[in-house]
Image (tube, grey):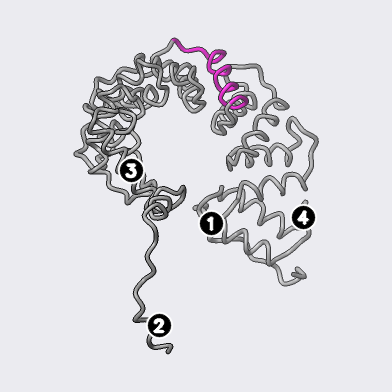
Amino acid sequence: MLRNIFRLPPPTLPLFLLVVLATAPGCGLGEAGRTGQQRSDCADGVSGACLEVGLKLLHGRKVFSDAGAAGPFLQQACDGEEWEGCYELGGMYRDGRGVGEDPQRAAELFEGPCDAGYGAACAELGLLHQDGLGVRRDPARAADLFEAACDAGLGENCWRLAVAFEGGQGRERSIVRAAELYASACVEHDYADACLRLGRTYRNGSGLAQDPRRAAILFERGCDTGNAQSCAELADMYAGGEGVDPDMEQAAEFYRRACGRVRRGDGESCFRLAGMYQSGTGVEQSNREAERYYNLACWNGYRAGCFPPPLTSSDST
């Protein structure tokens, strides 16, 4: 009887039920059906459908990724002023993904959506003008484009514009204006590199009145956003009582956060934390932890960690 089970014909389903299953949300057949319909709509000139198919193919969204096949769909979308299609296709030409690398063509594709207010395209076009790739190197034009992207809410470009003001690249040099933009990128957009840069400016008094307390606040914000160098700067300030009350336990905590993991943290912070464990400063003395952090310092590229001071046998752990 059991052997005959496998010889039974498969049960048949009513046609209406097969249609329901094929179009049900989350069903593979349903997704294939939707993609097929979008392809058909694209062929009929619906640019939004071309964009959806192109994005699916480019990023492998519910279909196999195929950048080469995505290109024609994204081009049709771009021709229909679906600006995301121009932006994505520009990125493909910039990187040579699915098409031949062609920065000049990338710049042309970024131009339209940027003019239409698509901030991400302005940012990419700005980088091309900054580096002179596919277009004439033009720091002033790059700064204009970074400003447009910053105004569109892309915090990294507020940072790029701040760098332009700080260095006088495409903008008249102004530390004050740079500081305003760094503050915007840090506070409004949580862009950690801006917190670090502005914190260092206040800590060192380079172009602004020295303000260690404000620097510490900025470093803490940058550290909370995951910037290892901000954590390291703040640890140094706690160790030296600079802008904050001296606190070796807090210094150890921020060195630990700066150290992070293998090849992802600040090696010098790992080294300093190792020394604190070796001497028992701000932490409970532990040779084992000291050795671990010396190793992390070495693995994170800080050469002194590869040749640490000897651990004395009198240490208990």
Q: Give the number of the mark in front: 1 or 2.
A: 2
| Category of crowding for the residue at label 1, using alpha-carbon neighbours closer than 10 angstroms: few (below 14), some (14–19), many (at least 20) | some
In the picture, residue 12 is in which quadrant? Answer: bottom left
Q: Give the number of the mark in front: 2 or 4.
A: 2
Dot 1 falls on a residue whose secondary structure is: loop
Q: Nearer the viewer, residue 210 or 20?
A: 20
Q: Which residue is disc 3 drawn over?
A: 35
Q: Which residue is disc 1 drawn over?
A: 262
Q: Which residue is disc 2 drawn over?
A: 5
Q: Which residues are magenta?
A: 172-188
Q: Which percent across, then down, holds residue 132?
A: 27, 25
Give the mark nearest the N terminus, 1 or 2. Answer: 2
Dot 3 falls on a residue whose secondary structure is: helix
Residue 166 numbered tag: none
Query: Does the magenta portion include 181?
Result: yes
Give the mark nearest the N terminus, 2 or 4. Answer: 2
Q: Amino acid at mark 3?
A: Thr
Dot 4 falls on a residue whose secondary structure is: loop
Outermost residue, left side: 100
| Category of crowding for the residue at label 4, using alpha-carbon neighbours closer than 10 angstroms: few (below 14), some (14–19), many (at least 20) | some
Q: Report, in whole angstroms, how far the alpha carbon at label 4 lies from the one at label 3.
A: 59 Å
Query: Does the magenta portion include 185?
Result: yes
Compared across the picture, whether 108 is left or right of 230 comes to left
Q: Mark 4 near mark 1, Cβ–Cβ under 8 Å?
A: no
Q: Which residue is disc 4 drawn over?
A: 283
Compared across the picture, whether 254 is left or right of 206 comes to right
In the picture, residue 142 is in which quadrant? Answer: top left
Q: Give the number of the mark in front: 4 or 1.
A: 1
Give the mark nearest the N terminus, 3 or 2. Answer: 2
